[in-house]
Amino acid sequence: MDEESINRILAELEAQNPLSAISLKDLQTLLDYTLRTNDSTDLESFYAEISSRNLSLTSLTSSISSLMDSTGPTRSTLSLLASNVYLSLLLSPNSPVLTLFTPMAFVSLLRSIRWAFKNPSLVSNDGPGGENRGRKKRGGGRLGVGKNKGKLVEESENDGEEGVIEARVFFSVLERLELVLGLVHLDRFPDSLRSLVQTVAEIPVVAVEVCRSSGSYEKLCELSSQILNEVLKAEHADQTVSAAEVLKCLTPLMFLPKSQARSFGLQFVVNRMMRLANHSSQIKKAVVNLPKYLVHKAPEKAEPRALAVESIMEIVKVLAFEDQVEFTHYVVKMSQGKGQFRLLSVDLILMLMTTLRDPLGLDSGDKVENLWGLTCLETLIERCSDVTAGIKARALTNLAQVVGFFSGNNRSRTLLKEVMGFGNEGLSSTKCRMNDLLLKRCMDEKAAVRKAALFLISKLTVLLRGALDGELLKIVGMACSDPLVSIRKAAISALSEAFRLFCDTNVTKEWLHSVPPLIADNESSIQEECESLFSELVLDRVSKVPSDTTSHHHSFTDKSNGKSRILDREIELLCPEGVLCILKETCDAEVTSWVKKICTSLGKKKRLKPKIATALQNIIRASESLWLSHSMPIEKWTAPPGAWLLLSEVSAFLPKEVEWEFLHHHWQLVDKYEPAGELRSPHEKRDGNEEMDIEPNSVAWAGDRVFLLQTISNVSVKLPPEPAADLAHNFLKRLEEFNMHSTEVNAHVKALRTLCKRKALNPEEADSLVIKWVHR
């Protein structure tokens, strides 16, 4: 630095005025040279000149501090430059650090750093190593962030170059600040330490808005991390105090919506601080207590609370196992506290159970140590009866997720059953406490609780692999008619899950009485779900009947239950489990109309698969074949209940899949043999006489004839002319003689009308034929 520059600086110090920009730059040049060459000769000469004018170094510090306190967009560059000069003075060789460093000057330095983020020129540039994405062509504009956020800031090329310089100075300030902390110990200045931590912790938050490139942001976060890492060293303060201060300032970052700033806060704790904790019991203690601190600072609203839970778990996962267990005990105690803590504990228990290793103690011989998972599970079950509806609903939902998580493992499934009080009979056990709990929750006045209870039931059906309690089954079925769409959907899901896994009579009956009626629901999405579930759980199951059933007959020698029951057992073995029960229940008067509507809707949408028609024919053939294989009289045979009904519905849309020979054979069969005596109720009790046991059910026989006629009517559209004419003649003869049961008249007329149209060469001839048959 030449003599003119020195004299100008000294004159400004004597006048007690802030240094001018030119003087500040000259001084920075001198300091940069000194630091680069490690030659302090020129700097010491400058200090000697200051002393010769009866000035102290304090006057230099004061002048620089006043510049660091400069505010306003036009003075931000000067403020940053002054900060860089001040730090360079402290870092220079043989620097009188204790004289130059003052708490007031340090506060001014931190204020300068904060102000730098409000400067648009820093915002618009990326600093060293970053991509200058903000740079536009001449005449272009860019968005300024900070105090002028959202406004268009016009920059010339010179302005851009100045901004790049300022950004470089800012990075230099942070780099030199870290180095200064190696010289100046802040243990004597606790307020300065606190201000430093607060300032540095804010940098990643503000930098998300002001940095336009990932390179700049990563550089800022790395510098911030290094400064905080330096602060945590023992020479700056008691590590318990400094660690607590750092964690306190980073806590707000962990509750931010998912962002880079949130990641910075979490990564600093789980990476840097955990590494330091391996060598410092004070830092370890602070990190171990952090999850508990976060619990008390967690927001009450749903989304921020969820983020808080995620952040807490990120930290808990890196703790030692014994510390993790200690935290689970703390969470269990929370569940007995205020409402917000009970709700938070319910969410944390779910994450603890599904995240930490071996929560149920299955892989450890030390059962006492691993009881934490069972304790958490018990706590979650208790919260299902909380006084607050929101907590009840959340506990039920989270318990369902826990059940679903552990249902895939046989050992955990067995333990879950035991803890939740299930006997060998599952939910049907009379002593099952969960059964009582679910009955109450399914009838709760709050919709959210009812919905959560239904969700839990759907998960428990997978866990238990057993039938639901009859009373609970009925309540779930009733919920399918709930006024709220969400409840109806949850009930459909729960009941369908049970039906998907178990095909016993009770579940089948409840499902067919509860779900198919929803084809008439006013919510289109429920109608579509009803169709899809019927296709999956009814039609697809029936379609799985093997094509060659006659070669797999099973013989039973026990005659004690009657021949028809033996035959029923044999035909059941030929079909997939539950198929005959499903077909039988479709004959119920309350179910039949809905089955017809669903089949019609699926047929119109071309969603009926050909194999359903083939499977139904196979069932009827197999039943007849079995009957004859036992030397039973064919005139007393009837097909499995529901088979002809369903075939009559699907054949309307799959006429080509029904064989004419099959229909012709069965029409001849029912036309030739008619039941003797009066019609009998299908539910009429039989006595022990075996001869009575094989009497045909007259109602079933008449019903099958009607459905057979309907099937013929559907298929006759595709019949050749000659078979169609013969069949029409047969129908007309029966109508003329009225040689049929009254229930068959409509079916005969409808079939005859279809056949007349099929026989005619054109529509006009078809109409005349129909009129002719009517007159006759």
Image (cartoon, rainbow, N blue to C red):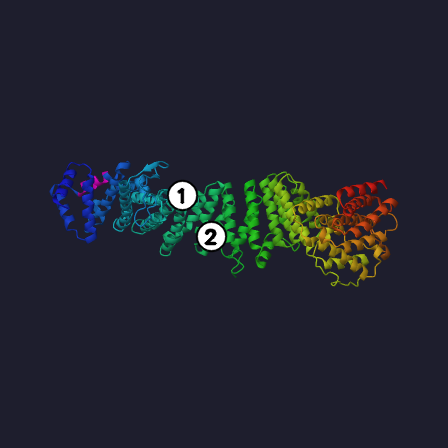
In the rendered structure, the answer to whether residue 110 lies left or right of residue 477 reads left
Magenta residues span 57-66
Where residue 226 appears, as percent x and y from the top left, is 32, 51
Name the quarter where the C terminus is drawn: top right
The amino acid marked with disc number 1 is: Pro
Residue 740, x across and y down, in percent: 85, 46
Question: How many tags in the picture?
Answer: 2
Between 633 and 572, the residue placed more toward the observer is 633
When asked about the image quadrant of residue 744, the answer is top right
As for residue 306 lying within the magenta part, the answer is no
Residue corresponding to mark 1: 252
**In what element is the residue under mark 2?**
helix
Q: Residues within 10 Å of mark 2 (few under 14, many from 20)?
A: few
Which residue is under mark 2?
Answer: 326
Q: Quadrant of residue 149?
A: top left
- Residue 287 appears anywhere in the view: yes
The reply to whether residue 503 is in sight is: no
* 262 lies left or right of 50: right
Q: Nearer the viewer, residue 452 or 76?
A: 76
Residue 166, image x and y in percent?
27, 43
Rendered image: mark on residue 557: none
- Which amino acid, mark 2? Glu
Measure the C-alpha gap from mark 1 to mark 2: 24 Å
- Give the x, y percent position of residue 157: 28, 41
The answer to whether residue 61 is magenta is yes
Q: Which of the two residues, 559 or 712, is positioned nearer the viewer here?
A: 712
Residue at screen point 22% across, 49% down: 91
Q: Earlier in the sequence, mark 1 or mark 2?
A: 1
Label 1, secondary structure: give it: helix
